Image (tube, rainbow, N blue to C red):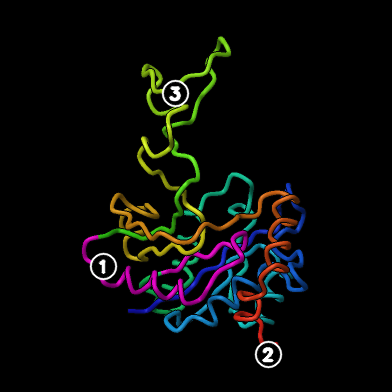
Amino acid sequence: MKFAALITARSGSKGVPNKNIKELHGKPLIAWSVMACKKSELIEDVFISTDSKEYAKIAIHYGAKAPFIRPVEIAKDDSTDIQVFKHAIDYFVTSQIKVENIIHIRPTTPLRNPEIIDSAIRLFNSNYQQISSLRSVHEMPESAYKSFEIDELNYLKSFINPTSKIDSNSPRQNFPKTFTANGYVDIVKSEYISNHNDLHGDKIHAFITPSVQEIDTPDDFEYIEWQVEKNLAIYNKLFGGI
């Protein structure tokens, strides 16, 4: 099966301006995702979907393909992933590029091991007929069952079941494990998206990864920079020799 990576990187970040090309340990953030895909043994092509010619130029420098620029109307704060993927799939079909499965890579999760990406692809392949997609997750440090909402009277209510009287102070082992999507590696089917107008479908295979930090704020950026400086293993795996 044809596997291609699609790195989604619009230019209009508000929390961290030009986040996707901000340097992390001397390399543009987007380069970390491109190199993770290039070092994969199973990804055959790496494309970038961006509204910025500058971003595209940087991605090309590190080995990605940028044959199209994303239209501004699907590069806004409220633009959806399904819009971005349908635009890319339309390009692939029109250009007669065979891409059966798309690896969704977000630059905001930069510390990726290419070997883990390949493990996700193998898991996806081995369950292909039974699933609609695959999403990476890691276990939440606190179960979501211990979370709260605040009602109109400023009272805490159980997030999972507002009418329950769950003792949130019980040991975490008493609660079910819960997981959060982390953007490490998601895999979707081009045909499924085209036929159902749905990105992931209702049979999403979980792929559990080590806990990873996503970048949304300047503090996140500083923390990940600290992680890289503390352990250069991923940096060397991606950029060794460059």
Q: How many marks?
A: 3
The disc, 2 or 1, on the residue closer to the chain's N-terminal end is 1
The residue segment tinted magenta is 102-130
> Hey, which residue is sitting farthest top in the picture?
153
In the image, farthest residue toward the left: 129
Give the residue at x 51% y 24%. 149
Q: Name the residue under label 3.
A: 158
Whether residue 194 is visible: no
- Residue 217, image x, y percentages: 71, 49
| Image location of residue 156, percent across then percent down | 52, 18
Name the amino acid, label 3. Ser
Q: Is mark 1 on a helix, strand or loop?
A: helix
* Residue 27 spot, x, y in % from top left: 74, 73
Q: In 3D space, how far apart are the residues under numbered discs 2 and 1 (Cα atoms)?
A: 36 Å
Give x and y (percent) for residue 195: 31, 58
Query: Which of pointers 2 and 1 indicates the residue nearer the eye?
Result: 2
Check the image and report above or below for 26 versus 141.
Answer: below
Which badge, 3 or 2, comes first in the chain's sequence? Answer: 3
Whether 194 is drawn above or below 102: the answer is above
- Amino acid of disc 1: Tyr
Q: Mark 2 points at which residue?
A: 241
Residue 235 visible from this viewpoint = yes
Residue in the picture at 32% in, 69% down: 123
Residue nearest the observer in this picture, 157 or 188: 157
Q: Does the magenta stretch include residue 108?
A: yes
